[in-house]
Amino acid sequence: MLRRQSPHHDKSSFLSGPSEMAARIRDFDWSDHPLGSPETWPPALRLSLGIALNSAFPTCIYWGPELRLLYNDSWSDIPGPRHPACLGEPAEEVWSDIWHIIEPQFAQVITTGQGVHLQDQLLPMRRFGVDEETYWTYNFTPILLDDGSIGGIFNSGSETTRQVLQHEKAQLLLDLSDLYRNNSNIEEVCARSLELLGEQLVADRVGLRIASSGSDNQFPIIAQWSAKGIAPIIETSGGAPFYEDIWNELLDGHVIRLDGTDETRHSRECDILAKLGCAAALAVPWVEDGRTVAILFVHSYRPRHWTPIDIETVEAVLARMMMMMERSRAAERATLMNREINHRSRNLLAVVTAMVRLSRVEAPDVMRSKLLDRIAALSRNNSLLLDRSWERVTLRQILDQELAPYKGNDKTELDLEGPEIELTSDASQAIGMVLHELATNAAKYGALKDIGGKVSVHWELTPEHQLCIRWTETCPETIDVDGLSDIGFGSKLQELMVERQLGGHLRRELMPDGLHCVIELPWEDVSVIRD
């Protein structure tokens, strides 16, 4: 097979290959260089470099007393912007930032004559203007001259930074899993999660922002960790902490890296970092249903470039934290719902018992019809709460439900006016029954019976901390007040709901134009929805 090679070769043939570095070495001015012209180089150097230049594996040679650098194409990415100026330069100058680490390794090879192998060696290089945490697996092998002495060192290897950081990321996530399994306190878990992330990234400050309820642009910090000697962020306003366009990018679900890598916004990044009081910042959003609901940020007081592994790690921790908080909220909701269901079941049974006890002795069919009608009203009120997952319902929702059969026609006029008021489950149940009785009586005897009637329901929160509801009927014809003055079951039920269950007051007055009713409830049983 070797007979097939070209017969045209000389001492410079080791540089005849098509690689970029072979061309650079050929074109390099070696006339005044300590290594001299390539034709004069020792056979060991020419042989070793020829092997390196034709290898696809990252390989370099350190040659001579100053360990001057020669390398192949695959190795040219390793020194970053130092390439190609580092060609032929002393190792101590090329690797001034890591010389304190590799110089003892060179010395070991030279003094012992034995090669060394390093696995996942940490080399904090400064390749792109900032210190980087890099890891490498490589060999240093002595190159022997004809007399047996060492003329240089053969170096081959590859970067393992991603593998090492991936392993560290996996270990971090395992630590978080242990933390979440053994601790149910949300605040403690969040604080410890941020601490672990900060230590993993060798950061100076880590914090979690959560969107405020009812706001698309308010993200207060709910948890924060700072390294020793680093002050936490103290927010003084609720506005966007960056330029609006960059902040909007974050709200749209884009990761924001502030580390000088985006030349198009360099001046703005400098302003933002100055306001944050750090040299580099990273912000990762958490998006649900197309909306950013949380932001995990990381600050560094030293310049650094945020790598894809850094971003992946922050995203993984943020995902774990958000899922943990959602599970906790779901468990809390389930507990509250079970408690609410139990409480409401007892109340429902109590109300049904009162209905039966207060009912007049009437014909069975009549009594049965009235009871079923009132139980149906209770059922509708209960369904309204179920539709809202047992959260509070508004007074207007209850009114809309009870008066729905009378809306949308010309027979009667409905006038509902008042602020948006949320009622507790107990208050909504009791008020729902009262309004049902009022609507039923109005349909049988009052304003909802004949064409031209009107029912006005106005409510307000008074300075005396009362919710005041005014039910006013206006009938098209005069009512025989004396004929309807008897206090029946509906009136007793209303008084029971308002006065005994809610601690309020109910006043009913039957006027010639219709029923006037005023309900007053303590403010403690209600809350107002504010814009």
Image (cartoon, rainbow, N blue to C red):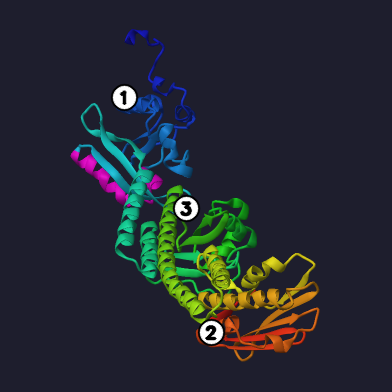
Q: Do labels 1 and 2 touch, CB within 8 Å? A: no
Look at mark 1 in the image and give the residue it sits on: 43
**Mark 3 or mark 1: which comes first in sequence?**
1
Quarter holding the C terminus is: bottom right
- Magenta span covers which residues? 91-112
**Is 96 part of what is drawn in magenta?**
yes
Chief secondary structure of the magenta span? helix
Q: Amino acid at mark 1?
A: Pro
Q: Nearer the viewer, residue 339 or 7?
A: 339
Look at mark 2 in the image and give the residue it sits on: 496
Any mark on residue 16, and which?
none
Q: Do labels 3 and 1 touch, CB within 8 Å? A: no
Count the numbered circles shown. 3
Residue 343 horizontal side relative to residue 369, left or right: left
Q: Residue furthest left?
A: 112
Look at mark 3 in the image and give the residue it sits on: 306
Q: Residues within 10 Å of mark 3 (few under 14, many from 20)?
A: some
Residue 161's spot in the image, x, y percent?
Answer: 37, 45
